[in-house]
Image: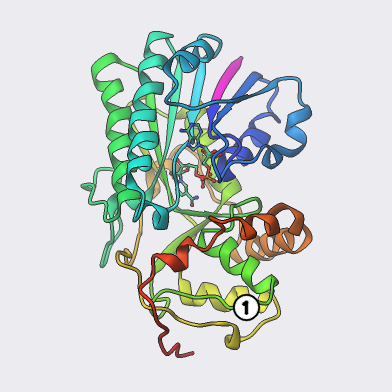
Amino acid sequence: MYEILVTGGAGFIGSHFVRRILRRDDVSRVTVLDALTYAGHTGNLGEALLDPRLVFVHGNILDAPLVDELMARHTAVVHFAAESHVDRSLTMADSFLMTNVLGTQTLAASAGRHGIAEFVHVSTDEVYGSLAEGSASEDTPLRPGVPYAASKAASDLVALSHFQTYGLPVCVTRSSNNYGPHQFPEKVIPLFTTRLLQGEKVTPHGQGQHVRNWLHVEDNCAGIELVLRDGKPGEIYNLGGGTDLTVRDLTVKLLALCGKDWDSVTCIPDRQANDLRYSMHWDKIAAIGFRPARDLDEGLAETVDWYRHNPDRWAPLTRTPYAARITDAIAPAGEEACAH
Ligand code: NAD
């Protein structure tokens, strides 16, 4: 039986994972440890909160005594907790290093002390940096281009060092950009969707030429579950297989789904650092059975529908002082002609 400590389980991906893992009969306990930063919300866990196997603990992964106390009651760790938004990392990198690097060290050290049998560290394709051409495999050198990616790359190395040094059975997953319901409206899909639904303009950086691979959050969670079950300790698994699309083409799709046209678009100068393209090989995880199941157009339609029907979940967030407006705050001032 699995007794799983899930860090960051009130965030976007972590909450999808918790709901998914609770469908399994061989899971007897799931503890969510989450600091409920601006990005975390217990409402993301929905009906899972009623499951008697779920315990929610409001706390910080940097709190070593608390982490030790919780670790003693679990057999596995799936570690999502992180500062996760690139734009924020450009102006507040310290908190990224604290949570993402030192937080991972705190968890891994405690996991080692308590003989944890599986430790899945959830990471990102952004650690490989921008690739002009080709795709990164798991042994491609890390060239993170922005503070968020640097903090994740460092956290991957910290986690893996606990395998090398102490034999902690760590696996690392590196996924491409996730999308789906319940995402905080700061990353491009929920940000643009919520703006369009409110009748506001959306603002691609530059000419929206940046390419990302879009993976449905449920596909990522299926991959993480697979690695938890069948991953080989000490290994890294790229979790790609979504759809490559420029931000510009993505914007066109979101305009159509929200019933808007190009008049709702104002291009702004590119931000200070913006990796042009990410791309990964994912044959290693495919070899242990991973197959992404979600079509991008269907997944986007379902995602936009969720935002359309749940304004109570996101509209208050767009009115907070932090709001989702940081994305504009870090862009150089001005507008650019936005050809279409
Ligand atoms: P998110 O920002 O939605 O959620 C992060 C969660 O971690 C929040 O619930 C927050 O309250 C919690 N948290 C933050 N600091 C904490 C701390 N010190 N102690 C305890 N809890 C803390 O992030 P997400 O998009 O769900 O990403 C989850 C993980 O997946 C992250 O590690 C991220 O780097 C990685 N990832 C995300 C994407 C993506 O597209 N969103 C892609 C690849 C990898």
Residue 117 position in % (x across, y down): 45, 15
Quadrant housing the N terminus: top right
Magenta segment range? Answer: 1-5
Query: Horizontally, is 66 left or right of 26 in the view?
Result: left
The quadrant where residue 63 appears: top left
Residue at mark 1: 255
Percent position of residue 116, x then y: 45, 14
Residue 79 location, x and y as percent? 47, 31
Q: Residue at x 26, y 51 (%)?
A: 144
Residue 179 as seen in the image, left or right of residue 207: right
**Magenta stretch contains residue 2:** yes
Colouring style: rainbow
Compared with 175, 106 (above or below) is above
Badge 1: residue crowd in 10 Å (few <14, some 14–19, many ≥20) = many
Q: Residue at x 67, y 37 (%)?
A: 42
What element does badge 1 sit on?
helix
Relative image position of residue 46 (x, y in whole percent) = 74, 39
Whether disc 1's CB lies below 8 Å from ligand 1 is answered: no
Please identify the dominant SS of the magenta region. Answer: strand
- Of 95 and 298, nearer the camera is 95
Q: Amino acid at mark 1?
A: Leu
The residue nearer to you, when weighing 168 against 7, is: 7
Q: Quadrant of residue 296?
A: bottom right
In the rendered image of this protein, does residue 119 appear above or below residue 207?
A: above
